[in-house]
Amino acid sequence: MDDRFAFSIQTGSPEPIYRQLVEHVRRRVAGGQIKAGDELPSVRELAQLLAVHPMTISKAYSLLQAEGLLERRRGLAMRVAAQHQHAQPAASRIELLRPALARAAAEARQLQLAKATVMKLFSDILDEDEHP
């Protein structure tokens, strides 16, 4: 499967798997990794790959279709809707990231970690993904 669709789910997360998939697609479209016309893996293919029930994938795809991010074509793969030709502006992408960072900040405060320690950890994590 194309790396642009390398879905990662956290089975131990309190966030439902379908919601994780929705957020993943939103971020990839917002960041410009997947664009208008790009076809997503079929429900069956993605369900097998992630070892989840096909209805989980179907629910995620339906929500994305309802918000206009994906379009369904009878007998063909779901694809990214035509209006998503380019990455969203940086301000929009930042707003997508803000909730995750707010949760991480709350957890860091609960753990009573120093700001410098948390920032260093975040920087290290960002660097890990850049250098596989």
Image (cartoon, rainbow, N blue to C red):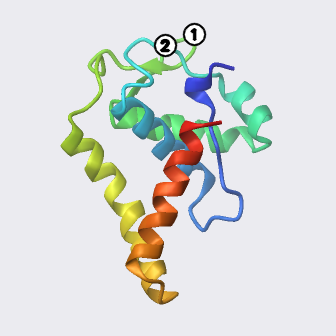
Circle on res. 25: none
- Considering depth in this image, is 73 or 103 the residue closer to the camera? 103
The amino acid pointed to by label 1 is Leu
Q: Quadrant of residue 130?
A: top right
Q: As displayed, is residue 87 above or below residue 94? A: above
Is residue 109 shown above or below 128? below
> Which residue is denoted by mark 2 in the rendering?
73
- Can you give x and y, in whole percent of width and height, for residue 13 in the image? 63, 64
Helix, strand or loop status at disc 2:
loop
Query: Residue beneath label 1, please?
Result: 76
> Which residue is drawn at the image coordinates 59% and 9% (left, top)?
75
Quarter holding the C terminus is: top right
Is 101 in front, or is 47? 101
Q: Nearer the viewer, residue 109 or 83?
A: 109
Q: Are marks 1 and 2 in contact (CB under 8 Å)?
A: yes
The CA distance from mark 1 to mark 2 is 5 Å
